[in-house]
Image: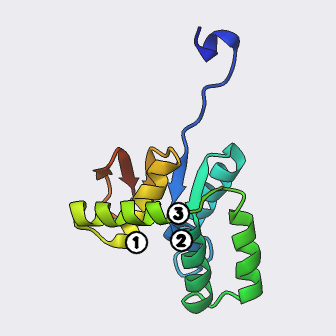
Amino acid sequence: MSSKAHGAAPRLSRTFLDSNILLYCEDSANPAKRVKAVGLVQEHLRQKTGVISVQVLQEYFANATRKLHVDASLARQKAEVYTRFYVVEPSVNDIFAAIDLHLLRRFSFWDAMIVHCARQAGCREVFSEDMHHGQVIDGVRIVNPFL
């Protein structure tokens, strides 16, 4: 029997959030993107469908403090909030898989890490402004939520 026959809610699919989504939550220079990003973060926290990686946390902290001038203590607190998402902690084998994906598909190693981590976490989509919207890589669709 399907889960619907038992009255269970269908399982919501996971979505990987790239660091630029988290950074727009802090970016007062882009109010429309800020509102959209905050909404996405809140929705995926509430539904427990958001996924990030250690790389995303690192990029968030580094860029929030350096480029957006967020106080380091506040950026740390926000990073702690983001660990409520499912956090992928890549292994050495994951790094080599991303290198292979980079070599095969000819896009940046860092984007390959994002896609690989998303796939490993069972995500169907990666929300990112930095990759090609609509592209499907290893079964993971890239979505620019700001379009």
Quadrant of the snapshot with the C terminus:
bottom left
Q: Is residue 55 left or right of residue 140?
A: right
Instruction: Indicate the position of residue 114 as horizontal and vertical percent values.
Output: 44, 62
What count of labels does the image hold? 3
Label 2 or label 3, whichever comes before in sequence order: 2
Label 1 or label 2, whichever comes before in sequence order: 2
> Residue 91 has which mark?
3
Labels 2, 3: front one: 3
Instruction: Indicate the position of residue 45 as horizontal and vertical percent values.
Output: 69, 52
Marks 2/3: CA distance?
12 Å
Tell me the amino acid under the disc marked 2: Gln
Tell me the amino acid under the disc marked 1: Trp
User: Is residue 117 something that shows in the picture?
Assistant: yes
> Residue 55 has which mark?
2
Structural crowding at the residue carrying mark 3, measured as other residues with C-alpha within 10 Å and reported as few (<14), some (14–19) or many (≥20) = few
Q: Quadrant of residue 1?
A: top right
Instruction: Indicate the position of residue 56 as horizontal and vertical percent values.
Output: 55, 69
Q: Which residue is mark 1?
A: 110
Tell me the amino acid under the disc marked 3: Ser
Instruction: Indicate the position of residue 105 as horizontal and vertical percent values.
Output: 23, 61
User: Is residue 128 something that shows in the picture?
Assistant: no
Structural crowding at the residue carrying mark 1, measured as other residues with C-alpha within 10 Å and reported as few (<14), some (14–19) or many (≥20) = some
Q: Are marks 1 and 2 in contact (CB under 8 Å)?
A: yes
Q: Residue at x 50, y 44 (%)?
A: 122
Q: SS at mark 1?
A: helix
Question: Does residue 22 sit above or below 123 in this rendering?
Answer: below
Q: Are marks 2 and 3 in contact (CB under 8 Å)?
A: no
